[in-house]
Image (cartoon, rainbow, N blue to C red):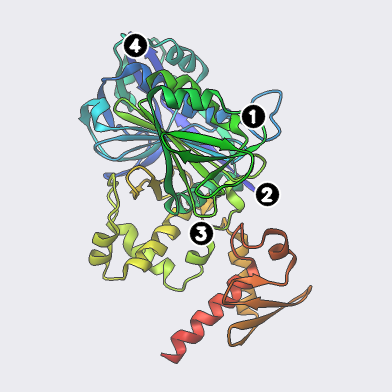
Amino acid sequence: MTSATQAYTYAAPSSLVDGRLGLATSGGRALSGPAVAPRFFSGVVTQAAPAAAALLGVADVALARYHQPQSRPGWVRDPVVTCNGDRLRFESFSACGGVYARLDLLNGALDGEVFDRGTTNVDVNAPLREALARIGARDPLHLGVGLDELVVTTMDGAVVEKKVPLPERWLRGFAEVQVIASGMDQRGELTGMAAVRFLRGLPKKGTVWVAQAGRELKVSDRRVPGSVQLAGPNRLGTLLPLLRFAKSLRVYGPADAASSAWELELPGMRYTLTLSPERWRGFSGEGAVLDDLATDEAENDADVVGMLLNFEPEVEIGLLADRAGIPADRVRAALTQLGVAGRVGYDLSEAAHFHRELPYDKDNVILLNPRLAKARKLVDAGAVHLEGELATVRTSGGARRVSLADGSCTCEWWWDHRGSRGPCKHVLAARIVARAAVEVSR
């Protein structure tokens, strides 16, 4: 595993003083262009207590290592915030790469002025965390995302700098999650106290399956039709402090019932946790993006589609297809390509992509799929020989037989994972060559 170093630079620390929450921003991108310390929003949060608790939850996930927890905290990776005009989205990933958290502060919870749209990191320091934990239901909360709100602090304006490692698996997780989430459907819902009873009654360890049964969610120790897999239920821990505000709990899962997503609807906002299939397993190795990235058009299409994105709260694929002059399936592949650079996410509640720009150096995120790089190397070396729906891929370890029909292979990777973590490099190489052959024959 490789990692890059990211430097966060803040003009002052974030603070909460006299009901005014000023979130310091680091380098990022806005509609107006690259910004050292962008200013996005200033106004009142109409639901102070749930907003403060949910923001603290996002920060807690960024601190957490659910697999093999360390006795002391590791490097703190500051949450990412995106202003999409009518909402603010706060995102983080756990240090182990297996839990993704997002808080959507929607229009109903915000009353203020939007100065720009874009994405940046925000400083969430230890004193701020303590202050957020003390906000009560009757407390006023004025939120500012950007420098001007920090004038109320007693700090001397000293620059705050943090240098933290960004592991490859952490960066790749942002790309994988949006692709995996786009294949999920809602599998269950609870309202009011039923959601509270369910979450509090979950076991702390092990793996269970959850399925809707009438108005309840039932927990089973084995997979049943329509269920979602929940490995390491303790990874839902940041939902528990929010239960007193919860209006409903929605559960999402893909057809294969592996990963799962858990969404609390709060007053004017949503808090979502997306979990990897196993407690020890991060999202970075799922391989969900590889088939889309392997298409010849994806990179060029991504350049075109990327220029059409304007930090919209909802990316409309049909509209993008019309504007770009390409089919919808190629737009989806282009969005996957953009996801590798952190430029799109996926909102389960609205079943739509949204635009954001991860505030990390491009060099840190552009070469994050070694399987695809190895597949292209095999293609360039002429190692792939097609035989109808079969292919032989010659490697230093011997010849591998690939079935294009079902994506199976005779390599160790396929036998270990059976396609559950995306295609192996041999299958990818064979598909690239097969697509090229179809194009030549046209």
The structure residue drawn at horizontal position 47% and vertical position 29%, both measured from the top left corner, is: 58
The image shows residue 23 at horizontal and vertical percentages of 38, 24
The image shows residue 255 at horizontal and vertical percentages of 50, 54
CA distance separating discs 4 and 2: 44 Å
**Quarter occupied by the C terminus:** bottom left
What kind of residue is marked 3? Val
- Name above or below for residue 40 compared with residue 411: above
The image shows residue 294 at horizontal and vertical percentages of 51, 69
- Name above or below for residue 163 compared with residue 360: above
Mark sitting earlier along the chain (1/3): 1
The local secondary structure at tag 4 comes to loop
Q: Is residue 157 visible?
A: no
CA distance separating discs 1 and 4: 32 Å
Q: Which residue lies under the disc numbered 4?
A: 137
The local secondary structure at tag 3 comes to loop
How packed mark 3 is, by other alpha carbons closer than 10 Å (few <14, some 14-19, many 20 or more), is: many
CA distance separating discs 2 and 3: 18 Å
Mark sitting earlier along the chain (1/2): 2
As drawn, the label of residue 289 is 3
The structure residue drawn at horizontal position 43% and vertical position 66%, both measured from the top left corner, is: 299
63 vs 142, left or right, is right
